[in-house]
Image: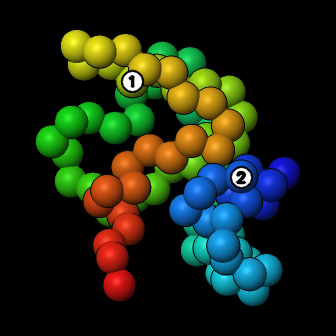
């Protein structure tokens, strides 16, 4: 199921099976209770969160909703090669 979520995201779509397996081995699955703050603006980056189930609310002045296969924190976690 996690592999399907990653495949449906543009950033991972072009990876072959071996590359995607490396991504999966480098990560970990984590569950957050409802209303948990996952990221805070201005906090150090370096993590990528893939939403595999449920929804995440992003709030500042504008409210956005993300769902399965959306990515959080990619700007700090992924640098161009």
Which residue is identified by label 1?
Answer: 58
Q: Residues within 10 Å of mark 2 (few under 14, many from 20)?
A: some
Taking 17 as reference, is 20 left or right?
left
Residue at 67% over, 65% down: 13
Q: Is residue 35 above or below residue 1?
A: above
Report x, y in % for residue 20. 70, 75
Q: Is residue 12 above or below residue 20?
A: above
- Furthest residue in direction right, as rendered: 1
Left or right of residue 63: residue 21: right
Q: Residue 8 shows which numbered tag?
A: 2
- Gap in Å between the C-alphas at discs 2 and 1? 21 Å
Relative vertical location of residue 61 with respect to residue 30 in this rendering, above or below = above
Tell me the quarter of the image containing the C terminus. bottom left
Residue 62 left/right relative to 52: left
The quarter of the displayed image where residue 34 is located: top right
Quick one: label 2 or label 1, which is nearer the N terminus? 2
CB within 8 Å, label 2 to label 1: no
In this view, the residue in front, 25 or 52, is 52
- Element type where label 2 sits in the image: loop
Q: Residue at x 31, y 56 (%)?
A: 75
């Amino acid at each position: 199921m996690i592999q399907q979520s990653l495949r449906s995201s543009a950033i991972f779509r072009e990876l072959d099976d071996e590359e995607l397996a490396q991504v999966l081995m480098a990560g970990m699955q984590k569950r957050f209770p409802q209303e948990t703050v996952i990221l805070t603006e201005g906090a150090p980056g370096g993590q990528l969160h893939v939403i595999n189930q449920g929804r995440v609310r992003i709030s500042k002045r504008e409210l956005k909703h993300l769902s399965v296969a959306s990515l959080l924190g990619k700007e700090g976690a992924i640098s161009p090669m």
